């Protein structure tokens, strides 16, 4: 790799830690099913010894409420690992439950770092059909991003099919915008450009019965200095439903991704992406370069360390898999 790519490959991402908590054999507790800790190794050592009951800790709260949770400061009674999180520079925790109908498949925890260089945003958008036709900001974490952008976001509403959250809501699938300044699809483009936010992707959530029919979308807004992840891909089922085809993606090291012959197909059950597709449970590949086929080849060539595969469910069926690389 060139010196520039090596520098980009070692720069910090907005997301610093990802954990996947899954129900145990009895369905009474959540235990760690996989994780990427990056440099937060002390936090990882503590986490591997833990489990959570329904309503307990951040993953247990997401399980009980059936909806995503944004915890902007990892302190207080809801969070059990405050000292370890602070020791490794983690400041925000986001819980994303994955339900297949009424069944909880997993809770994904996303942790972000603290510091003046932590630009970007993770937003949770919510529509309450009984109250409004609009989707509004439920909560968000903006790191060191200027307060003006958060101020505008809290006063913005989207109809289905409008803007980044509205498009993901309408399609029921991930939506990626490689350049938020182009075109008119991103309604906050001027404000985003002023604070250095240049790319965005949104993922529709699959809440549980306790969410009372509300709709949720997680939006991830990436900045030049601290991209959300190093590489993002969306994989969709082929017509036969036996494999996934990469439909879009962007790599901070290689630019916008084409659908090439080496990595255009992943069979069901193959590697982290195929496992997420087959099971409906998020999967973590601790060594991205060892993933089978073109996925591993591309990751190895660019020095990408780990992969997290998130299934997107609709009516209990996996309609897409999102892959994050770190």
Image (cartoon, rainbow, N blue to C red):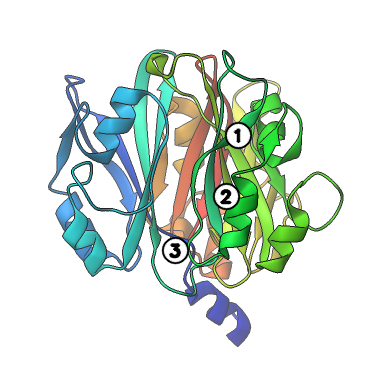
SS class, disc 1:
strand
Q: Is residue 192 visible?
A: yes
Q: Which mark is residue 136?
A: 1
Q: Residue at x 46, y 57 (%)?
A: 288
Relative image position of residue 122 (x, y in whole percent): 52, 50
SS class, disc 3:
loop
Q: Can residue 221 be seen in this view?
A: no
Is the residue marked by circle 2 packed among few (<14), some (14-19), or many (20+) residues within 10 Å? many
Residue 174 occupies quadrant: top right
Cα separation, mark 1 vs mark 3, equals 35 Å
Determine whether 323 is above or below 170 in the image: below
- Check if mark 2's residue and mark 1's residue have beta carbons within 8 Å: no
Relative image position of residue 142 (x, y in whole percent): 51, 57
Cα separation, mark 3 vs mark 2, equals 21 Å
Furthest-bottom residue in this view: 3
Cα separation, mark 2 vs mark 1, equals 15 Å
Asked whether 202 or 36 is in front, the reply is 202
**Looking at the image, how many numbered discs can be counted on the residues?**
3
Is the residue marked by circle 1 packed among few (<14), some (14-19), or many (20+) residues within 10 Å? many
Q: Which mark is residue 75?
A: none
Q: Which mark is residue 305?
A: 3
């Amino acid at each position: 790799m060139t010196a520039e790519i090596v520098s980009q490959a070692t720069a910090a991402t907005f997301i610093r830690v990802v954990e996947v908590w899954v129900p145990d054999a009895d369905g009474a507790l959540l235990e760690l099913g996989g994780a990427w800790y990056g440099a937060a190794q002390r936090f990882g050592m503590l986490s591997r010894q833990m489990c959570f009951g329904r309503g307990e800790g951040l993953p247990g709260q997401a399980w009980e409420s059936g909806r995503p949770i944004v915890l902007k400061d990892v302190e207080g009674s809801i969070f059990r690992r405050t000292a370890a999180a602070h020791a490794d520079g983690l400041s925000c925790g986001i819980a994303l439950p994955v339900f297949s109908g009424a069944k909880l498949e997993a809770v994904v925890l996303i942790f972000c770092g603290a510091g003046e260089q932590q630009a970007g945003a993770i937003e949770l958008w919510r529509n309450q059909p009984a109250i409004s036709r609009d989707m509004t900001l439920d909560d968000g974490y903006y790191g060191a991003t200027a307060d003006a952008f958060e101020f505008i976001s809290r006063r913005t509403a989207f109809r289905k099919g409008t803007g980044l959250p509205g498009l993901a809501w309408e399609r029921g699938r991930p939506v990626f915008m490689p350049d938020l300044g182009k075109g008119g699809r991103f309604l906050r483009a001027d404000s985003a450009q002023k604070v250095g936010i240049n790319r965005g992707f949104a993922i529709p959530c699959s809440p549980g019965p306790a969410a009372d029919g509300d709709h949720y979308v997680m939006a991830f807004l990436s900045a030049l200095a601290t991209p959300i992840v190093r590489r993002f891909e969306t994989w969709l089922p082929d017509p036969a439903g036996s494999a996934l085809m990469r439909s879009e993606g962007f790599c901070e090291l290689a630019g916008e991704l084409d659908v090439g012959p080496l990595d255009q197909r992943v069979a069901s059950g193959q590697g982290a992406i195929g496992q997420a597709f087959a099971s409906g449970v998020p999967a973590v590949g601790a060594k991205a370069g060892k993933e089978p086929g073109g996925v591993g080849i591309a990751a190895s060539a660019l020095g990408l360390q780990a992969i997290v595969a998130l299934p997107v469910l609709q009516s209990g069926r996996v309609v897409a898999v999102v892959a994050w690389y770190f």
